[in-house]
Image: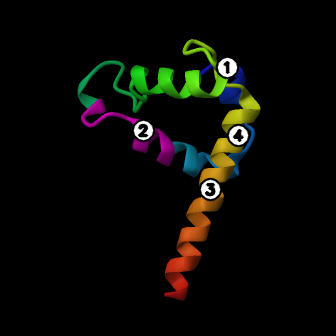
Amino acid sequence: MNAASLWAVVRRPWLWPIAVRQALRLAPNGWWRNAPFLPLPDQRYLGFRLETQYGNAVHNAEPHDLVTYLEWCRSYQRGLRRKRARG
């Protein structure tokens, strides 16, 4: 993640919980056992996702795309909670 993408999320505190949740979901099992001891996604998976979106596995995610993705994840989670509450 580049600084612009990080800053785009930092400026939106309502996205912090979903950003942490997604980081943990995308991190490989046992991520805490290996340096840098952060829940970073597998580089092969990240390369695949970047290539499918931008056509290039080394392209940095655009900040607005990251924000849009996190907002989508947030709204999806809210929808699931509402659906469960209704039964």
Report x, y in % for residue 10: 68, 36
Residue 74, numbered circle: 3
Q: On screen, 83 above or below 5?
A: below
Residues at marks 3 and 2, CA–CA distance in whole angstroms: 15 Å
Q: Who comes first in sequence, dot 4 or dot 1? A: 1
Question: Element type at marker 2?
Answer: helix
Question: Element type at marker 4?
Answer: helix
Residue drawn at x 71%, y 34% as measured from the top left: 65
Q: Give the range drawn in magenta.
A: 21-31
Packing grade of label 3 (10 A; few <14, some 14-19, many >=20) is some
Residues at marks 2 and 1, CA–CA distance in whole angstroms: 20 Å
In this figure, which residue is indicated by the disc labeled 2? 26
User: Between tags 3 and 1, which lies in front?
Assistant: 3
User: Which residue type does callout 4 highlight?
Assistant: Val
Residue drawn at x 42%, y 29% as measured from the top left: 41
Report x, y in % for residue 79: 61, 69
**In the image: residue 33, left or right of residue 69:** left
